[in-house]
Image: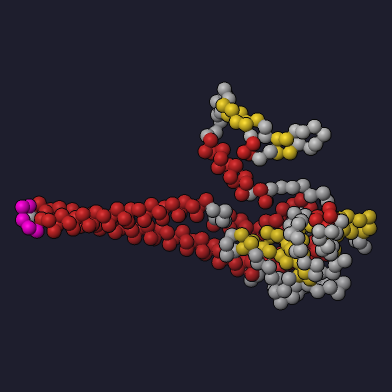
Amino acid sequence: GIMAYNKTDQTKDKAHSARDMKDWIIAVGKHKGIISGEEWVQVQKMLDENKSTSYRKPRSNVALLSGLLKCGNCGAPMRPKLSNRRTADGELIYDYLCKTKELSKSHNCNMKRVNGNMADKVVCEAVYRQAEPGSELMRGLTRMKSKIREDSGALDREMEALQKSITAHEKEIKGLLKSLERAKGSVASQYILNEINKKHEENEKIRMKIEALQRQAQEQKQEPVLSENDFNIYVSLLSNFKQSFDSLTVEQKRYYLKTFINDIVWDGQELEIRYFDTSKGETDLSGVDEESDNSDGSMRAEGGEPLRLGCK
């Protein structure tokens, strides 16, 4: 096993902070290692790739878009800012404020706040609509499921066809060897031997291609895309989203939203919701298909346009 030192900066009168891994001091320990170095490195790589989705406890216990909402001007997260006022339904009134604007006192960014209560409501309504069978997101999920099957099937079929070619060549080589035995000592023997060598070289090239396809198939398995089983779970969650949402806690609601949404960008007038991208397994399905009612007169998702909200 190994021992790692100097992992954190513990300067007096300062908050402890993690040092860069290159500054660690690594020593061989007397204890027996639990996992291999290869596994440890692989896990560190996975943690690094997934750090953007790691859990960060929001400061607000009411705002749903914490960790999702970003400033369209500087890209900083927008944090909920609670007030002491309440709505007619008794809910605390809050806004989302750009973190850069707050820290720089509007010097580095001057993005307008967004009404938090309204933003949470219309984003949830937008996700409700995406849970409908004919929505863009649901159709995209169905297409992605078919693509996963097609990609996997295409690789399998290609490898199977190449393996059949190897078998056919080996059969031909056996026949040529018999012919070579009969033509031993004749002029034809050299031509037969050349043909055998040619078939053998073709098989070696085919084997290299099969190995490349096998590596490609292995890489696809390791890529952060949904398996068919994950897919079924994802569609089930999306289908049951509206029915179960009202019974969930605020933490559970946030988790649900982060399952379907990559991020939300506020540009001062519009909210752009970027859903899970069913073409890549990542992001960017931003339009909303239907118009929703709006009692306060501000514009909302109509004809695939981003959501529009009142601002201040």
Q: Is residue 4 shown above or below 58? A: above
Residue 90 appears anywhere in the view: no
Q: Residue drawn at (76%, 63%), measured in percent from left and top?
A: 73
| Residue 39 location (% of width, % of height) | 54, 39
Q: What is the residue that sits farthest to the top in this orientation?
A: 30
In-front residue for pair 73/167:
73
Can residue 7 be spotted in the picture?
yes
Specify the quadrant of the image occupied by residue 245. Answer: bottom right
Count of labels in the image: 0
**Looking at the magenta stretch, what is its main secondary structure?**
loop
Q: Which residues are magenta?
A: 184-188
Q: Residue at x 18, y 58 (%)?
A: 195
Residue at coordinates 13% horizontally, 58% vertically from top-left?
191
Q: Is residue 179 magenta?
A: no
Percent of width and height locating residue 243 = 73, 60
Rendered location of residue 248, percent (x, y): 76, 53
In this view, the residue in front, 284 or 105, is 105
Q: Is residue 34 left or right of residue 209?
A: right
